[in-house]
Image (spheres, rainbow, N blue to C red):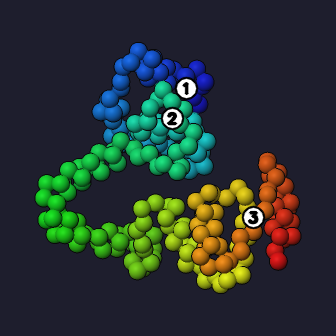
Amino acid sequence: MQSRRSFLGTISVPTAAAAMGLSIRPTELRATAHDIAENLRKQPGTASALAADEDFWFEVAQAFTVDRSLVNLNNGGVSPAPALVQDAMKRHLDFSNLAPTYTMWQVLEPQREGVRDRMARQWGVNAEEIAFTRNSSESLQAVQFGIDLQRGDEVLTTTQDYGRMITTFRQRVRREGIVLNQIQIPVPAEDPKEIVRLFAEAIT
């Protein structure tokens, strides 16, 4: 398991470089990304064991080109990509710009349904059930807007829910006259029964 000492050691070099006005190029961080990805595939153990293996997750972290002089605590909403994914995106962008009108309509667009078919096979569903969106928030909003709600219908949620989702329901409040009711859950929430009780009492 990685110790605090070794963790601090991994961030000390970039921090010192930043303090001296030096930069660590993404290409340097990316140089071993492929090796890291290959090594991760060979890791033994069950999924639950790997989930608790700090050394495993340390290797995963090295596949990303994030600034090691900063402590990145919020990655969920901004979706940083591993170096290999960044490289693939750049290759596709370069390809698209070689002959934009040709690559867009003659090469890329015809591949769209093929991608849907492969995704459908991977998830064991019909391709007609697959829709591509730009991010998870947009996907959730599509579902929220698709719920059949009439004027006066009530949505019950909490004050701790994701802000973008709350904003979406508030938009439906203004546009369609639904009612948004938010309850406050204790922090920390230590008793599941208490949470259920709060929801039950707020149902009208």
Residue at figure coordinates x 63%, y 57% from the top left = 162
| Residue type highlighted by circle 3 | Gln
Q: Are marks 1 and 3 in contact (CB under 8 Å)?
A: no
Return the residue found at the far top.
20
Left or right: 78 in relation to 118: right
Question: What amino acid is labelled 1 in the image?
Answer: Phe
Three-letter amino acid code at the position of disc 2: Phe
Residue at image mark 3: 182
Question: What is the CA distance from the residue labelled 2 to the residue labelled 3?
Answer: 39 Å
Q: Label 2: how many residues lie within 10 Å, few (<14), some (14-19) or many (20+)?
A: some
SS class, disc 2: helix
Quick one: label 1 or label 3, which is nearer the N terminus?
1
Label 2 vs label 3, nearer the camera: 3
Q: Hey, which quadrant is residue 27 in on the image?
A: top left
Give the left or right position of residue 11, taking residue 103 as reference.
right
**Which residue sits at x=33%, y=46%?**
86
Q: Position of residue 59 (x, y in %)?
A: 46, 36
Q: Position of residue 39 (x, y in %)?
A: 40, 39
Numbered circle sitting on residue 58: 2
31 left or right of 67 in image: left
Place of residue 193 in the rendered image (x, y in percent of width and height, measured from the top left): 85, 62
Q: Residue 116: horizontal and vertical position, in percent?
A: 35, 72
**Residue at image x 79%, y 47%?**
188
Q: Secondary structure at mark 1?
A: helix
| Disc 1 and disc 2 in contact, CB within 8 angstroms | yes
Task: Give the quadrant of the C terminus.
Answer: bottom right
Residue 7: give its label. Answer: 1
Determine which quarter of the picture holds residue 65.
Answer: top left
Quadrant placement of the N terminus: top right
